[in-house]
Image (spheres, rainbow, N blue to C red):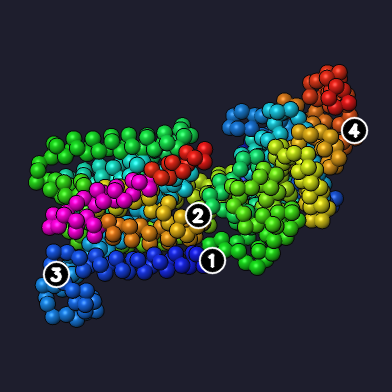
Amino acid sequence: MNKRIIFSFALLGVLTIVFIVISISAGSAEISPAEVVKILLGGGSDDTAAMILLKIRLPRTLAAAVLGGALALSGYMLQTYFHNPIAGPFVLGISSGARLTVAIALILAARGAIVLNSALMAAAAFVGALIAMSAVLLMSSRIRSMSLLVVCGVMIGYICTAITDIIVNFADDSDIVNLRGWSVGTFSGFKTESLVVCAVIVFAALTAVFFLSKPISAYQLGESYAVDMGVNIKAVRIAMILLSSLLSGCVAAFAGPVTFVGIAVPFLVKMLFGTAKPIVMIPACFLGGAVFCIISDIIARTVISPSELGISTVTSVLGAPVVLMIMLRKNKEA
Amino acid sequence: MSSSSSETGRGTKTDLLYYRSSNGTMLLIKDLCAGYGKREIAHDISFTVSGGEVLTFIGQNGSGKSTLLKTLAGQIPALSGEILIDGVSVSELKRNDAAKLVSAMLTDRPKTDMMTCRDVVETGRYPYTGTFGLLGDADKRAVAEAMELTDSAELADCFFSEISDGQKQRVMLARAVAREPKILLLDEPTSFLDIHYKLTFLEMLDRLRRERNIAVVMSLHETELAAKISDTVLLLKGGKCTGLGTPAELLGKERLTEHFDVSEGLYNKYYG
């Protein structure tokens, strides 16, 4: 492995730890970093501080890390799948599809039709993500242009959002308190139970994706080359679709819409590492997404404290310029 | 084996058939029909190629050369007929094992985002590497040798997207050769190359088949070059084989003018 890759991994690792500590220390209740470390190590005298730290800030920070990593990884896979650097779970409407089915599940649960737990919510999101993904795939078989495909994805996203709005309007207010909460996207109020479910799903998916890094590297070269290399292209495609839908669905279910992370992070990571090899990109995107979302979350809850910005507000400000940069670069190459 | 339509290339199970011919036949094609879905483009093609031999498809654009090569490369399933590699039907071979035996150099370029030429050549070793695709010493040696053999060693650290067409073609040949295949398939490998690169490319190919005993099947537009390098040529017209034999037998002026639908006067004006 070359020095640049080792250095970049070390950098991302350090950044992750540093920002996790900053994130846990930041907030309206003053807790000194020394005390933070003490509490994390199991000591500390102040019960309130420990409570805030372990029950509120820590789950929130870890959720931002896990789901941020999931988003970036899902984006990376979609970009590889479509050979399109501006594909991502949000622009292709996959997040909105997941949100629609989660809204339906929440309303059914409020009506007492089903008992909703975190795992079931993730399952609902996965189904929605897959439905939206199928619509995108259907379109992609007819559309060759990468920008047109994204436009189609955005349309699918709008359709899903519109249907969600209609359903929400017909529901009682009490049914949808939960939904309103994350319609702007946030990591706040993350329960430890949800965090565990997310972490299990995301790390399982991450492991699966990592084991696919060899066939993904073949797929990257183009379909005919993958076939020449003896890859079962259909199987790889299905695996990529299922895993990216699972990852982006999981984020949509527990944090709501979080924009641009899926596109910006893989691009930035590729620039940092100087390679597009999946075996490097897969863990690197995950780490990069984690750092990106932890930083975004810190900004979201500190700039207008004690009030809070939606997470997407911050990720858009940070991520959208990167997306514009990608498109300008592509334009120059063409 | 019967040539029923159920034998559609790789992956499908047919009755076992193993026979190894004694004369060194590496590739045996019998009654092969190739095309896309219901649209049959090449009909009833049969030929054999031995190790170290070069067979060249000669035909106009649209005569079915690429379709045949794609079928042999496993890119599209055969509609009917048999493809035997070293005596084993391709439908009996696992994808990965087939990839070890046959490597193809196609007309479309790979997407090589931030890949150096060495990275591109290394992808040729894919069927041999383990779960994570990491190259062992033998793989690295094969890559280095292939780049040496194709005069592309000095390009190893250049980005593939930044080198010239002629250089790209050499790197792609190195990639195909790094596989250490028994059969090499090339679809119009000399198109877009200037005369210097055309000739050095064919010289490399000639060395390869002699030194490594590789069976080469390719398509070429340049009949005069095909005549020099091929052991066998197969004339293709409208998807049908109209001649199979040595260049001396088939690439004479009369046969060519008829095959390419040009008048002798026109032919003489530019080629004579």
Return the residue at label 3: A30
Picture coordinates of residue B199, whole percent (x, y): 80, 43
Which residue is disc 2 drawn over?
Answer: A276
Mark 4 → mark 1, Cα distance in angstroms: 56 Å
Q: With respect to residue A288, does B265 lie above or below?
A: above
Q: Quadrant of residue A298?
A: bottom left
- Respond whether the residues carrying marks 4 and 1 are from the same subunit: no
Which quadrant, please, contains the N terminus of chain A?
Answer: bottom right
Identify the residue under disc 4: B249
Question: Which numbered disc, 2 or 4, marks the residue closer to the eye?
Answer: 2
Question: Of marks 3 and 1, which one's residue comes earlier in the chain?
Answer: 1
Eye-nearest disc, 4 or 3: 3
- Residue A175 visible (yes or no): yes
Secondary structure beneath disc 2?
loop
Residue located beneath label 1 in the image: A2
- Taken as a whole, is the magenta stretch helix, strand or loop? helix
Foreground residue, A177 or B244?
A177
Q: Quadrant of residue B268?
A: top right
The crowd level at tag 3 (other Cα within 10 Å; few <14, some 14-19, many 20+) is few
Which residue type carries mark 3?
A: Glu
- Using the image, tell me which numbered label, if any, was put on residue B163: none
**Could you say whether the residue bearing mark 3 is in a helix, strand or loop?**
loop
Please give the name of the residue rendered at 46% of the width and 32% of the height, measured from the top-left corner.
A142
Q: Is residue A63 above or below residue B224?
A: below
Location of residue A200 with respect to B260 vertically, above or below: below
Instruction: Residue A249: tell me if it is visible.
Output: no
**Of pointers 3 and 2, the one earlier in the residue sequence:** 3
Label 4 SS: helix
Q: Which residues are magenta?
A: A297-323
How many marks the image carries: the answer is: 4
Is B184 displayed left or right of A324 in the figure?
A: right
